[in-house]
Image: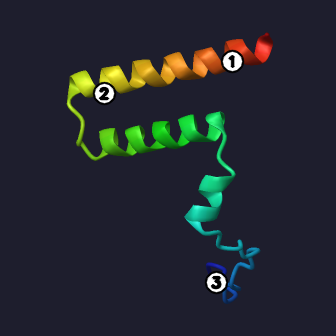
Amino acid sequence: MKKQETTTPTQEATTPTQELVSPFTEVKAMNHISAVNILIQAANAAQGAGSLSVRDSVLVAGAAEFLTNTQDANKKS
């Protein structure tokens, strides 16, 4: 005879709620690093959606790499 497995009802996961912040408030606190990160995220989303040509994807990736390398060099100085 096989032992019958019993299952318990799943409990709702309790996750801390994040306070919603207006994007207009976020813009006021933006710095160079967060601005570059936002642009990279937007470029990745556009590329993932197929909105960029191969040429545009290469140029955007190169620009992002250039900017992030420039920021890294500035931090080391």
Q: Which mark is residue 33?
A: none
Q: CA distance from mark 3 to mark 1?
A: 59 Å
Residue drawn at (79%, 10%) of the image: 77
Q: Residue flagged by tag 1: what amino acid is it?
A: Asp
Closer to us: 49 or 21: 21
Closer to us: 44 or 6: 44
Q: Residue flagged by tag 2: what amino acid is it?
A: Ser
Residue drawn at (20%, 30%) of the image: 53
Residue 21, placed above or below residue 67: below
Residue 13, placed above or below residue 65: below
What secondary structure is found at the residue carrying circle 1? helix
Q: Which mark is residue 4?
A: 3
Q: Mark 1 — residue?
A: 72
Q: Quadrant of residue 51?
A: top left
Residue 24, placed above or below residue 66: below
Residue 22 at what x, y percent from top left?
60, 69
Chain-order first, disc 2 or disc 3: 3
What secondary structure is found at the residue carrying circle 3? loop
What secondary structure is found at the residue carrying circle 2? helix
Q: Quadrant of residue 54?
A: top left
The outermost residue toward the left is: 53
| Marks 3 and 1 close (CB-CB < 8 Å) | no
Residue drawn at (68%, 84%) of the image: 12
Residue 74 at what x, y percent from top left?
71, 15
Q: Mark 2 — residue?
A: 57
Residue drawn at (47%, 39%) of the image: 39
Q: Is residue 58 left or right of residue 37?
A: left
Q: Nearer the viewer, mark 2 or mark 3?
A: 2
